[in-house]
Structures are given as C-alpha cells and as structure tokens.
Image: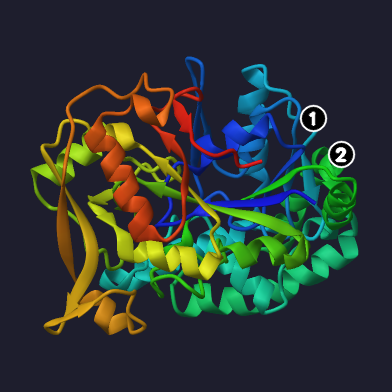
Amino acid sequence: MPALVLLGAQWGDEGKGKATDLLGGSVDYVVRYQGGNNAGHTVVVGDQKYALHLLPSGILSPECTPVIGNGVVVDPSVLFSELNGLNERGVDTSKLLISGNAHIITPYNVTVDKVTERFLGKRKIGTTGRGIGPTYADKINRVGIRIQDLYDESILTQKVEAALDGKNQLLTKVFNRRAIEAGQVVEELLSYADRLKPYVADTVLVLNQALEQDKVVLFEGGQGTLLDIDHGTYPFVTSSNPTAGGACTGAGVGPTKISRVIGILKAYTTRVGSGPFPTELFDEDGEALRRIGGERGVTTGRDRRCGWFDAVIARYATRVNGLTDFFLTKLDVLTGWEQIPVCVAYEIDGKRVEELPYSQTDFHHAKPIYETLPGWSEDITKAKTFADLPKNAQNYVKALEEMSGAPISAIGVGPGRDETIEINSFL
C-alpha cells in the first residue's frame, strides 16, 4: 500500500507543487485533502509555467488521476476557471475526481470573509478573502453546503435558507450590508450541477480500493505545518489541517495505510499574511531573497515575508507530522552569499530555547539565535548529483538535515521540473 503524504514543513509556499509534479509521473493518484483556492502551487514544465490554486498538481501528469478529497472546500467558479485555463493550454482534465462530500464555498461565505476581515482592522488575520474560513465554520456548525446537495434542490434550498438566517442578521445589523437572497444563491449553485456531475465520485471508496490494488497514491497538502489550525501559529493560521493527520480525515484513508511522509522545506523561510516570524528580515538580505526567489504569493499576489532558515520550526514539523524525508527547495536562491545565517534556537526572556514554544506569547517574543555557515558563488542550477554541488552548498544541506531531524532526499536547484537532485527515491 504505497501511500505518501507530501506537505509543507514551514508556513506554506515551500514548493510543494514542483515536488508533487515530479512524483506525478510515478504515482497513480494525487489527492488534495484540505484547504481550497487559498493555496497556490507553481509548476514549471519545460518553458511552461502553471499556477494551480484548487486543482491537485498531479493534473499535469497524463498518467495520474487527480482527486479533490472530502476535506477540501470548493469554489465552483474558481474550479471551472482553472479547468478552462488548463484545457485551453492543451491539458487533459477529464480524469479529475471530486468528492461529493466536499463542501462548497458559497457567495455568502466569500462576502462574510471579506467584511469580517475588514471589520477586524489592525487585528485582522490576513486571510485571502476567498471564503475559506467561513466555509469551514459552516461545516463545523453543520450548516454547510456539500457538492452532493446540488443534486437535491429541496435539500439545497433548505440548507441555504438555514445558513442565511444567521448570516443575514450579521450582515445587516453588524456590518450594515444588504441581506443576501437565498433564491439567488440556490440558482447560482444549481447552475454548476450539470458540469460538476461527471467529476463527482465516492473518492473514499476509489482511493481505498486503489491502495488495496497496490496503486501509488500521493496526498498533497496545501499551505504548511505552521498554518495548521491545531498545530500552527494560532490564530494566524488557515482553517484546516495541512499536517499529515489531515490527509487521513480529508481523504478518508486510515493512518495505517500511510507509508511515507515527505516535508517540503525551502532553503530559507517565508510566510504570507500576519503572525510571528522570528527570522524575518527587514534589510537588504530580505529584499534580495524576495527578488531572487520570486517571492510573491501564487494565490494572493502579495509579497512574501522573507527570512533565514529556521531549524526550530523544521524540527517541530518533523515531530508533528512524523516526517520520514525532506525535499529541500530553492537552494539556488542562496547562491552568492558569502555567509548564510541559520536559526538554531531562540532566546526567550534571556533563556535559550531549542524547541518551538508552547505559548503563543513566548513565540511572539522569540529572538533567533544564529549559526553562520559559509556560502558559495558557483551556479548550481546544472547540478545533477549531490557531488556536483560546491562543497559549501553540500555542507549547508548536511547541516540543515542534521538540525531538522529527517534525511533530505531531494534538492531543488532551480524552478524547472528537471532541476532537481534526487538523493534517495521517494518511491
């Protein structure tokens, strides 16, 4: 039962799309198991660049069946826009499967997200404003709309009316907005039903049967470990579980079927949105990392905050996910620095702390303790083996591996599909 989980080991944007795409030709199914179109993956194939938001990266591999699991929240308009864009570029999207239990991001979820974030002002979380959080809130409050509801107009109408009872009170009395008509929402949602129907499936059954037949299934997480609703830097997190356990609940596959958990690590650290970030740089180095690394959010279009590699959060990701391997990305971005600082611990209230603080307050006050490693100036984008890397680049990778607690099995040395050094096979 070769089931692999591939997830972000930092705050997202680590390069999961490239890693998934590289494995896509060797796996039978690629499954998105949480999040929505607040995630963004960039995949470069030859001279073509693809920006994916909701669709699994495996959709670019003809041999692979892409799956949107029950743990994902789906905006149908975004889904069809993304499918249309790929179809226009000659990508076959007909094999896509979508769980009938996946929840739908409704127009009122998007409205509530935007007005709430605006209302919070300085206390805003930094959401993408795409309705993700309110949709997950509806799911937990048991007033959510699932894809399967589109095929029973009576049930759909009842559920939309029930959801809007409270939301319209909020919109009109707190936010001074107009009430939303239930009939208009139902009409819009029903307009997606026929086009969605060929993709809708019992994906839990499909995936478990595939594993029983020794098919290779790759579970692809959106965002990253430090954005997990339970294990991230709460409240500056996403509304789902990008960590490895989320793959089980978000796809309906038992934990005993997972054989490998791969964490994606950027060779430095970035995050988008608000929240603590101990190694964040506000100087020329930070600007250089942003410029050279092209650090702009695929989904948000916002500049990413940049900082040096943080081994403390890497160790934390290893622990909470049970990581078996790391895929280190964007090592080439660090070419040209004479010295490269790496955060090995924090100073909190005058004390050295080796592990991620349990307390939100402590993490907000954490100051990075750095060790400095010698850099390299040689171009590494043509390297095909670990031995091809400059000695200092090799030492940097080895140091990160030792500090992070799991072996680095692959290294990204450029954005292209073929610009990767594979040390140990993931399959």
Q: Is residue 264 visible?
A: yes
Compared to residue 30, the image places residue 222 above or below, namely below
- Relative image position of residue 77 (x, y in whole percent): 64, 43
Task: Name the residue located 41 percent from the left edge and 43 percent from the top edge.
Answer: 328
State which tag comes first along the sequence, 2 or 1: 1
The kind of residue on which mark 1 rests is Ser
Q: Would you say the residues marked 2 and 1 are in contact, meaning their CB atoms lie under 8 Å apart?
A: yes
Disc 2 element: helix
The kind of residue on which mark 2 rests is Pro
The residue identified by callout 1 is 94
- Relative image position of residue 111 (x, y in whole percent): 52, 61
Looking at the image, which is closer to me, 124 or 182? Answer: 124
Q: Is residue 222 visible?
A: no
Task: Name the residue located 43 percent from the left edge and 73 percent from the top edge.
Answer: 175
For label 2, the crowd category at 10 Å Cα-Cα, with few meaning under 14, some 14 to 19 and many 20 or more, is: few
The coloring applied to the image is rainbow
The image's mark for residue 198 is 2
